[in-house]
Image: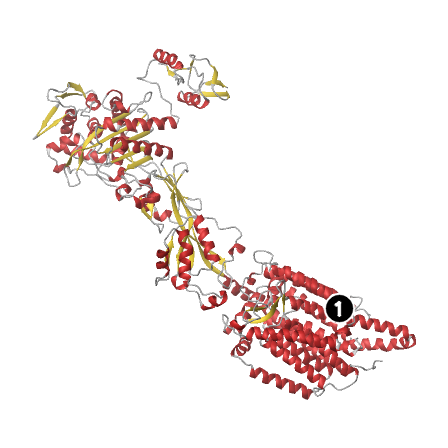
Amino acid sequence: MMRKDGLRKQKTTYGILFCVILLLFVLVIGKLTWLQIINTERLANIAQERMIFEDIKKNPRGKILDRDGEEFAVSVMADSLYVDPQEIIDTLKERKQSSLVRETRTLSAKLLAPVLNMSQEELLDLFSTEGRFLWVKRTMEPHDAELAKRIIKENKLPGLHFIQESKRHYTKRGAAAQVLGFVGTDDKGLSGLEYSLDEVLEGKDTHYETLYDAYGNKIWDKAYPEPLKQKITQVYLTLDSKMQYVLEDAMEEAIKRTKAKGAAAIIMDPYTGEVLGMASRPTFDPNNFHQYSPEAWSNKTISMIYEPGSVFKPIVACMGMAEQMITPDTIFQDDGKIQVADRTIHNWDYKWEYKGKGKIPFREVIKNSINTGMVQLGLELGAHRLTNYSKRFGFGEPTGIELPGEESGILYKAEDMYKPDVATMAIGQGIAVTPIQMLRAICAIANGGELLQPYIIKKIVAPNGDVIRQGEKKVIRQVISKDTASKMRTMMEQVVEDGGGKSAAIKGYRIAGKTGTAEKLAEKGGYEKDKYIASFVGFVPADKPMYAMLVMIDNPQGAFYGSQVCAPIFRDTLQQILVAKGIQPYSGEGLPSFEQLEQVETKSVKNNQPVPQLTLLPDGKIKLPDFKGVDMRRAAGIIRQGRLRMKPHGSGLAYKQEPKAGSVVAEGETVEIWFK
Amino acid sequence: MNRKFMFWDNPKQAVVFLVVMLIAIGAINIFSASYKDQVSSLFRNYIIFAGLGGAAAFVLQKLNYRIFLNKRFLIISYGIIFAMLLILFFAHKLPPQLNIFSSITVTMNGATRWFDFRIMRLQPSELAKILTILFGARYLGALLAKNLPVTLRNKNILGIFAVTCFNGLLVSQQPDWGTAAIIIGLLVGLLLVAGLPMLEFAFIALLGAIAVCFKYEDYHLDRIKVWFDPWSKPLEEGYQAVQAQLTIGSGGLIGTKWGEGTFKFFHLPEAHTDFAFAVFCQENGFLGALVLITVFVVLGFALARIAVSTKNEKGFILVCGVSLFVIGQAAANMAMVCGVLPVIGVPMGFISYGGTSLVVNLIAIGLALSVYNDEVAQEKARSVLEPQERRSGLHVVSRRWHNDA
């Protein structure tokens, strides 16, 4: 039976205690108001500040690409392992927790030695040093790094940390090695473009804000679910990787065959000054540059100076024509040798019984590289004009190509030149040039007289897509008139067609060129006995050149004439390039007549694949060949040659055409071809 | 008793509804507070413990609560809990090489508070809280029923006071001063409710003060110091308090999205346990906090309604203990987290992560509901047996309701 007023006192006390609790709730609400409404902004800011720290993301070094975006050099981020030896001692606390005392240094060395491919002793030494930061292994392969990370984590090895570093890969191995150069382990460019463009290429750090937890662990994967994009600069070169390949192959072959000490070759677009290919020997693999001698690192195309020899003759000839002293038809007297002061200068094919060619026009002097004729012209020009024109052709100063280590060559001062100096300069001696200078001067002849600034950087694209540098054709000056250039081209074409450079001829193409052989300059001055530098320079097609190329071979063993050693390299290289680039032979002047061609064709039908040719008729019309059996690509190339249009049907090999073979069409007309 | 409580048909319905709501909030908050890379096992455990506790509460409210006030049951329970606390005490104090208990106990952040049963952990000190309430209900209720004065001079009262203090002492050595304070505080609260003379209360307070001085350590003072000004040492002693306040403050009025409260990433120590309220405030804002407080306060009132309408003395003390325990802890925890009280380790029922704590809270609710059911049954029985008295008594009962509400 309950009491009517039961527990009244108790309930009152309970009510009071209850109210105390309610009061606490009221205080809480008051404090929350203060924190969340009145001070929320200030507190939120402080909270942010406590979590956000600036962080740095390392970006890989910029890419170097060829003109079409083919990769020459790329960098990837690789893990580098370092050790803080002071950290490597297990703390007492850790020992207590894992309840086993261990000698961490020995353990770490033992576990990591196989993964790092280092000896235990080596690692133990490293782990026992005094410092606080020591590299163990830099830019590790991803697989090795993963393995090492796992070992470190699983065994709780202290003091071992990873940093991301950029690692350079030269994807084309040795291709254009000297142009590209290489980087050291700290990602600093040490040679070539890597050196000169180091500031542009070097991996920039991206600074960004990161959320950190209180233990200093990043939680940015939460805040930035998307990983930050890598920022990579792209450097596009004017080099064409396919041409570069052909060039490298040719150089490799040439060195093997001639056992030469060195070599250099450049292919250039004579109208723009773009360097399309550039190779130097001896060479190296930039991925492992330290395994090669420093000599291999140097780019001979810009840094080697040599006497050009006869290759210089077209330049002197241009001077003569520009000064209107000669025309290609001016008659010279060749006696096989010529006396200048105390010196006798012989022709290259001089023999005791041989008395020269007698009266010959100047074009013969160039065609057969006759020294006596050139000497006469040189003496007539005189020291001042020779040196001044040489300077105008860009000799004696660096071309200004974007590559480091360019030499300026050697040019006499006109005042210091004795008569024999003047005479020998006319045949390309007593002047020292770099291959790039020589080729550039020849390009001025090829392109109608413009001396260009050669360049190798097509464009540089910043990580944000902005083009921060654009390589452009730059005309330095008009050195000779178009007419002079054109006359010179004709003379140089004859050199290949019928003169000293025959071995450079490519059937069906018009090629202009000049050979040269010179004694090698000794480093201490004077000449090295029985050491020669053979070279060839030329361009194709002769009338409207697309490619100009220089080949120089330093001290070839055995045959040493430019025509023997270099002209074939020129021929083989350009032939491959012309085919690869789909530039069809142009059967113009000097090629077999239509009748002959038909004979050839009928003959060659039996010997497998004939290459049909358009025949240019004297009235400008075009005679169509039979396209039967030709594939579409080739047919298109042929059609393009005659500025005709092709309307293809089907695919495979041609079996029918309209208009028929042998019919005459005008430029711009359409030829239908059926393939199956 | 069986009358409308606010918009619920009866206080029991209200309690069930509010507790389910708290578990839902707790589950979401645990999920969010511990969510980093994937759904953590904490959330899974929380659901398991909530299920266990819910089942226990369901069974308990069906049972007669008196079986838990049985002397033998209490003594056996006390024996088990005391043994466990003693083992934890030794596990904490013994040097590592002699520690035979290290495999079954868990030490975290320098405190040995848990038994490790492989599949789950048990925190005996939480069980001690509920034991204190049962002790109070049994012995204080008995005195009230006999209309005897509640005084420490009574040997039963002195006995439960002594064993509770001893429990508290053991818990304080884990160390866990917050739980120890709650264990003893609960008993003192119940003694006060039962009518302990003020003089004896003063004596207990003095005893408490002496104990504090005796066990005083430097860091205790620091905790008090930083309570007044946590920003004076924001990176040392004040760290937890400052971080908690920053966490709460950055929530603003409406809070961040769920799961996006950033401070849980270790910036806030104990983000999912004692400081879960801070994460809750950050993610749900001031309005969310108000809702949570309201839920606790309404739950408190519902339990209070059950308490004051309980005619059985033991039942009354039991429900008083449960209500003070549940909302008192919640209030103390909130006050601690937002800096109204110094940082003492008090969990918030249902919201803070802690398996035992969750189960114990649900058991407490189950006991309170058992009292309610029993009281409703008694009322019904009375009305059947004595219809006369029921009719005449109706008015009186009704008036009493008005008086107390």
Task: Tell me where residue A64 appears, x and y as whole percent.
Answer: 38, 42
A492 shown above or below A53: above
Q: Quadrant location of residue A276? A: top left
The residue carrying mark 1 is B60
Q: Is residue A18 visible?
A: no
Q: Seen in the image, is B227 located left or right of residue A187?
A: right
- What residue lies at 33% left-to-right and 49% top-to-bottom? A184
How is this picture coloured?
Answer: secondary structure
Q: Residue furthest left?
A: A342
Image quadrant where one finds the N terminus of chain B: bottom right
Task: Tell me where residue B186 appears, x and y as whole percent.
Answer: 67, 77
Q: Seen in the image, is B100 located left or right of residue A396?
A: right
Image quadrant where one finds the C terminus of chain B: bottom right
Q: Quadrant location of residue A571? A: top left
Instruction: Name the residue type under label 1.
Output: Leu
Badge 1 crowding class, 10 Å Cα cut-off, few under 14, some 14 to 19, many 20 or more, is many
Task: Tell me where residue A520 appears, x and y as whole percent.
Answer: 18, 35
Which subunit holds the residue at mark 1?
A: B
Secondary structure at numbered mark 1:
helix
A5 shown above or below B277: below
Q: Is residue B359 visible?
A: yes
Task: Tell me where residue A389 appears, x and y as whole percent.
Answer: 20, 33
- A455 vs A613, nearest the viewer: A613
